[in-house]
Amino acid sequence: MITALVQFKLPKPLTSDEAQKIFLGTAPKYRDVKGLIRKYYLLSENGSTAGGVYLWESREEAERLYNDEWKKYVVEKYGTEPSITYFDTPVVVDNLAGEIIPAE
C-alpha cells in the first residue's frame, strides 16, 4: 500500500465550514477511482493550506490519478499547484473496523 500526502497553499484562508462545503462538492469524484482505498480531506488550523491523505493499493494507481489533467483541476479549483509526497504503508490500523491490515 502507498499513502500520498497532497498539499497546496491557498490564495486566501478558508474556514472549516467553507472547506467542508467545497470538499463535499468534490468528494463524489473520488468514489470509484481504481486503487483508491480511502481519502481524507485536510485543512490546516489557520485555513491557509489544504490537501488530502490518500491510501492507495499501489503507487502506479496513485500516479494514474495525479496526471496533468488532475493537477490542472486542482489549480483551477484552489488557485495553486499541489505538492505530492509518497510514503510506503506497510501496516494500517483501522479502529473503526477493528482490524490491523498488513500490505500485501
Image: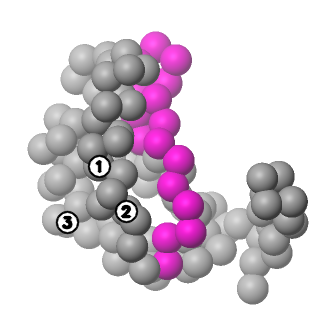
User: Who's the residue at 49% across and 36% down the image?
Assistant: 42
**Reading the chain from its start, which is encountered first: label 3 or label 2?**
2
Q: Would you say residue 49 sits in the magenta stretch?
A: yes
Q: Amino acid at mark 3?
A: Asp
- Which mark lies nearer to you, 3 or 2? 2
Q: Mark 1 — residue? A: 26
Q: Residues within 10 Å of mark 3 (few under 14, many from 20)?
A: few
- Which mark lies nearer to you, 3 or 1? 1
Classify mark 1: helix, strand or loop. Answer: helix
Prevailing SS of the magenta stretch: strand
Instruction: Give me the C-alpha separation between circle 1 and circle 2.
Output: 8 Å
| Magenta-colored span | 35-51
User: Who's the residue at 22% across and 36% down the image?
Assistant: 78
Q: Amino acid at mark 1?
A: Thr
Quadrant for the N terminus, please.
bottom right
User: Who's the residue at 17% across and 35% down the image?
Assistant: 79
Q: Residues within 10 Å of mark 1 (few under 14, many from 20)?
A: few
Disc 1 to disc 2: CB gap under 8 Å: yes
The mark found on residue 30 in the picture is 2
Q: Is residue 95 visible?
A: yes
Query: Residue 7, position in %: x, y?
Result: 42, 41
Instruction: Give me the C-alpha separation between circle 3 and circle 1.
Output: 18 Å
Instruction: Give me the C-alpha separation between circle 3 and circle 2.
Output: 17 Å
State which quadrant residue 37 falls in: bottom right
State which quadrant residue 14 falls in: top left
Query: Residue 29, position in %: x, y?
Result: 30, 60
The mark found on residue 68 in the picture is 3
